[in-house]
Amino acid sequence: MNAPNDNTAPKGLRGWWLTPPRPGMQRWISPWEYRHLRGFGVTRIAGGSVAAAAGLICLSYGVYGWAAFFLVLGALNLAGGSWFLTIARSAPART
């Protein structure tokens, strides 16, 4: 059979990164994470809570360097998780 090649797979790293299409800052999220936003959002919030708890424990023992590290890590994870959940909530429903 002499059918033309109808391969519609993305070509190269740039093509893979741009699927699924998404606007603006959402391009910073890896495609695999973007396809599973709710799961990764909940996981980031759980991880951020654990890191914040570790930071508070370090703070109570007076280890300020490690406390700052864990508190910053926890804050970034909590912010990222809430951003993921906000994007997932505002996405149109699948049909």
Image (cartoon, rainbow, N blue to C red):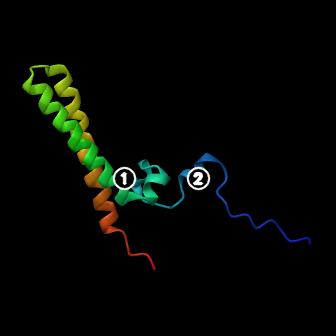
Looking at this view, is 89 or 61 the one in front? 61
Q: Residue furthest bottom?
A: 95
Quarter of image, res 19: bottom right
Looking at this view, is 84 or 36 the one in front? 36
- Whether 78 is drawn above or below 65: the answer is below
Residue 52 placement (x, y as % from top left): 18, 37
Name the residue rendered at 49%, 53% in the picture: 31
Q: Quadrant of the N terminus?
A: bottom right
Q: How crowded is mark 1: few (under 14 residues within 10 Å), some or many (20 or more)?
A: some
Which of the numbered marks, if any, corresponds to residue 40? Answer: 1
**Callout 1–callout 2 Cβ contact below 8 Å:** no
Which mark is nearer the camera, 1 or 2?
A: 1
- Whether 29 is drawn above or below 56: the answer is below
Name the residue rendered at 67%, 60% in the picture: 9
Q: Name the residue under label 2.
A: 16
Which of the numbered marks, if any, corresponds to residue 65? Answer: none
Residue 80 placement (x, y as % from top left): 29, 48
